[in-house]
């Protein structure tokens, strides 16, 4: 895997999340070309209707699609996705690389999730846990798991 992109809906505001992400971005530089792209979350009223939420998710999906690298594998993070161990994720990334896929995109949606059309487009729908986490923490967790996957595939003791 030569290129990894993390597409996220929503901006990191807290400095401690940004510091943790920056650390993994730095570490990942030894393994891949990493690109982190943030999209603004669509503004919604205090108590939005389902129609308003659906419309916002489709607007976010259009912005995401415009930034998807051609031919990239798309892994969408969603609660109903597949639960993988760190070893399983490392194996999946190795299989993608071995099949000639040089680019993978990990996608984190907004606080309302992802558009159903984006989920359907994904090569892998991935769940971090059945628990709910703040989107900012999920970004740190995804970057750490990508780093861990590269370490596992390199045979490093980091994973232990």
Image: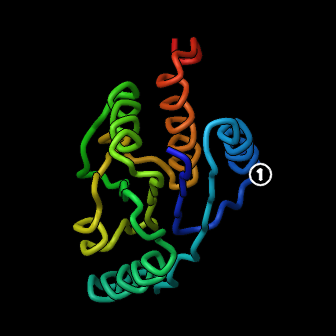
Residue at 48 percent of width and 22 percent of height: 152
Q: In the picture provided, is 153 more to the left or to the right than 156?
A: left
Residue at 57 percent of width and 74 percent of height: 39
Q: Say which of 151 and 135 sits in front.
A: 151
Residue at 39 percent of width and 35 percent of height: 94
Graded by Cα atoms within 10 Å as few (under 14), some (14 to 19) or many (20 or more), the crowding at tag 1 reads few
Q: Say which of 100 and 27 sits in front.
A: 100
Q: Is residue 27 above or below residue 64?
A: above
Q: Say which of 66 and 140 sits in front.
A: 66
**Which residue is the extreme one toward the front?**
100
Q: In the picture provided, is 121 more to the left or to the right than 151?
A: left
Q: Is residue 106 above or below residue 49?
A: above
Where residue 77 sits: x, y (%)?
37, 54
Residue at 53 percent of width and 31 percent of height: 150
Residue position marked by numbered label 1 in the rendering = 15
Q: How is the image coloured?
A: rainbow
Q: Secondary structure at mark 1?
A: helix
Where residue 62 sits: x, y (%)?
41, 84
Which quadrant of the figure has residue 38? bottom right
Where residue 4 sits: x, y (%)?
54, 52
Where residue 65 sits: x, y (%)?
42, 77
Number of marks drawn: 1
């Amino acid at each position: 895997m030569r290129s990894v992109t993390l597409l996220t809906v929503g901006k990191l505001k807290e400095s401690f999340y940004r510091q943790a992400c920056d650390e993994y971005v730095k570490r990942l530089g030894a393994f891949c070309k990493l690109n982190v792209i943030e999209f603004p979350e669509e503004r919604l009223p205090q108590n939005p209707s389902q129609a308003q939420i659906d419309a916002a998710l489709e607007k976010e999906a259009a912005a995401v699609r415009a930034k998807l690298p051609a031919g990239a594998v798309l892994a969408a993070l969603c609660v109903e996705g597949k639960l993988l161990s760190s070893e399983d994720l490392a194996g999946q990334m190795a299989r993608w690389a071995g099949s000639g896929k040089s680019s993978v995109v990990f996608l984190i949606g907004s606080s309302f999730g992802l558009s159903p059309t984006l989920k359907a487009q994904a090569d892998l729908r991935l769940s971090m846990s059945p628990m709910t986490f703040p989107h900012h923490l999920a970004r740190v967790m995804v970057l750490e798991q990508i780093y861990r996957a590269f370490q596992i595939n390199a045979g490093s003791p980091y994973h232990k």
